[in-house]
Image (cartoon, rainbow, N blue to C red):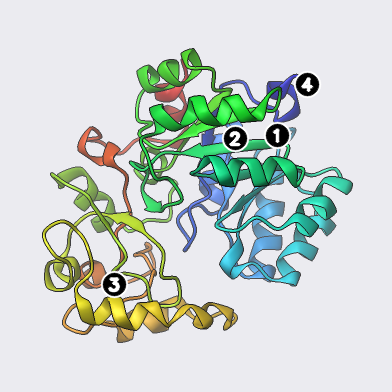
Amino acid sequence: MDIADRLKLDAPVVQAGMGGGIAGAPLAAAVSAAGGLGTLGLLPPRKLRAAIATVRDHAPGRAVAVNLLMPFTRRPHIEVCLEAKIDIAVMAFAIDRALIERLTDRGVFVMVMVGTERQATEALAYGANGLIAQGREAGGHLVGTVAQADFVPKALALAGSRPVFAAGGIATADDTRAALAAGATGVVAGTRFLLTNESGAHPVYRQRIIDTDRTLETTVFGLAWPERHRVIPNAATDRWCHPDGTARRLPAAINKFSAPLSRVPDRGDGALLRLQRPALPFLTPITLTADMPAAWVDRAALYAGETALRLDRITSAAQAVADLAP
């Protein structure tokens, strides 16, 4: 298989399907139009349908990809993807064999994000067309447990002829070249694309990333989704994280038993974040988008990878693709 042709790529660069309104149609369309693969983050079904149509209109002839964030993916999301005949689905944070089979039977190319050899083996056995090998240095929610450069060779050894894309620590063309030299088919970047004019991130959030001198791996923003994630510090982490990033006892205990809340549909992110306070131990995974007040920056999860320490400017999405291209 010519993977570049299958995914309609001019450059081996994939934009991560960042959820919460960060990777909407403007970003995904701009990345795809520039020759990379733009990926839509999960949206409510009606908005997802419209976003898919927008990407097609603004990036004609390019592939349409959707990130299926499995804790929050419901049957209507899948129906929208199939009815719209998307080209690529990225499955993350759970591996659903029946869903992989259903998507691939309808011609969808399914990539599964994995962070361990066990996850990679399972995804491949269930029929995944390719893998995204995530390193621990990635931003946002994490399946990665070791550095990307250490994990990619292990994923490649398991994948055989199926493509493996490297995720985590990707900020420059040198990073892309290093991943390709290790055998990866391409790279997946999140923070680099968050810092673009087309991303849905609030300008204050983007500036915090540029100004930061550290990131934290934590579980503190885990209400309804008690999984590890990487963020930059703010008032909420100052109050509820230990210096090493681990959540203090109270939010950790609350989050531990909150996973069933993820089954509540269309939770209304803006409304929840409006109620959230840095002084209270109820911290959701909601991030700060451009349509929210800038003052909420210290109560929201400000996701970013370790590449935040190497990125110092906001660019267009097209320039970001060019900066990452080998």
Residue nearest the viewer, comparing 54 with 172: 172
Residue 75 occupies quadrant = bottom right
Horizontal and vertical percent position of residue 224: 45, 77
Q: Rounded to the nearest whole Å, what is the CA distance between mark 4 and mark 3? A: 47 Å
How far is disc 1 from disc 3 in space, using C-alphas?
Answer: 34 Å
CA–CA distance in space, label 1 to label 4: 18 Å
Mark 2 or mark 3, earlier in chain: 2
Residue flagged by tag 2: what amino acid is it? Leu
Residue annotated with mark 4: 1
Could you say where residue 170 lies in the image, as x and y percent from the top left? Answer: 38, 31
Residue at 61% over, 21% down:
10
At a point 37% along the width and 22% down the height, the residue shown is 175
From the viewer's side, name the closer residue of 116 and 276. Answer: 116
Please tell me the numbered disc located at residue 37. 2
C-alpha distance separating marks 1 and 2? 8 Å
**Could you tell me how far apart the alpha carbons at marks 4 and 2 are, in whole angstroms?**
17 Å
Between discs 4 and 2, the one toward the N terminus? 4
Amino acid identity at mark 4: Met
- Dot 3 corresponds to which residue? 293
Q: Which quadrant would residue 306 be assigned to in this image?
A: top left
Q: Residue at x 73, y 43 (%)?
A: 125
Which residue does the image show at 16% across and 47% down from the upper left? 212
Determine which residue is flagged by label 1: 62
